[in-house]
Image: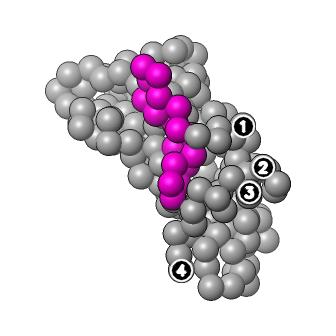
């Protein structure tokens, strides 16, 4: 299994629609960087957020998740309460090839502020907007900036196409658009 280069990522994005919209080079200019890097792609967070709130004293249960545990916000700057989290999504829509697995890591700019970005691997054959989880591990409110870099995706090529892809088994998060809550 090898990490795929900027050249491979660009070709797959432009010729196979793997990443849409696709930014061909790192973009900074006063914002948290995003776009194509040497061996990855830095995705942006969209302006749709679900901020966790415990107004109703809910219990977090992945088998019975209550949507009223979140407050929805469409904003350029999301403020996450101390020791809480928010869900968001990427601006980019991904279509993962059958012989590729994608791993996501948070941007160091956020990590150095105590903000952790979590995403499960993007499996072969999966497509959709990626739901991002931002955890504010600090005792202070934390800001997340929409339309700026949030995380970096690394593309790993398998030794051969998988026998059964995410699409083949009709995975529950296939084709998701927008911020998607847990499903059972």
Asked if residue 20 is among those painted magenta in the image, a careful observer would answer no
Q: CA distance from mark 2 to mark 1?
A: 9 Å
Q: Residue 20, how many percent across, how many down?
A: 73, 41
Foreground tag (4 vs 3): 3
The reply to whether the C-beta atoms of the residues labelled 4 and 3 are less than 8 Å apart is no
Real-space Cα distance between discs 4 and 3?
A: 19 Å
Q: Which residue is mark 3?
A: 11
Q: CA distance from mark 2 to mark 4?
A: 23 Å
- Mark before the other along the chain sequence, 1 or 4: 4
Residue 34 disc label:
none
Q: Nearer the viewer, mark 2 or mark 1?
A: 2
Write down the region rendered in magenta. 26-43
Which numbered disc flags the more N-terminal residue, 2 or 1?
A: 2
Labels 1 & 3 near each other (Cβ < 8 A): no
Looking at the rendered structure, the secondary structure element under dot 1 is loop
**Residue furthest toward the left?**
139
Q: Position of residue 125 (x, y in %)?
A: 73, 65
- Mark 2 crowdedness (10 Å alpha carbons): few <14, some 14-19, many ≥20: some
Mark 2 lies on residue: 14
Few, some or many residues within 10 Å of mark 3 (<14, 14–19, 20+): few
Asked if the stretch drawn in magenta spans residue 30, the answer is yes
Q: Which residue is mark 1?
A: 21
Mark nearer the N terminus (2 vs 4): 4
The quarter of the image holding the C terminus is bottom right
């Amino acid at each position: 299994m090898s990490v795929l280069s900027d050249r491979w990522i660009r070709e797959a994005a432009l010729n196979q629609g793997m990443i849409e919209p696709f930014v061909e080079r790192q973009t900074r200019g006063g914002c948290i960087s995003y776009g194509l890097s040497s061996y990855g792609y830095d995705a942006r967070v969209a302006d749709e957020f679900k901020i966790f709130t415990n107004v109703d004293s809910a219990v977090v249960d992945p088998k019975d998740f209550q949507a009223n545990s979140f407050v929805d916000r469409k904003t350029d700057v999301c403020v996450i309460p101390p020791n809480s989290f928010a869900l968001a999504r990427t601006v980019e829509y991904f279509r993962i090839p059958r012989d590729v697995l994608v791993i996501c890591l948070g941007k160091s700019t956020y990590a150095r502020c105590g903000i952790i970005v979590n995403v499960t691997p993007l499996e072969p054959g999966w497509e959709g907007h990626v739901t991002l989880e931002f955890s504010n591990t600090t005792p202070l409110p934390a800001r997340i900036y929409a339309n700026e870099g949030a995380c970096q995706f690394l593309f790993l090529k398998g030794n051969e196409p998988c026998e059964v892809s995410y699409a083949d088994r009709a995975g529950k998060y296939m084709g998701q658009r927008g911020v998607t809550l847990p499903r059972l």
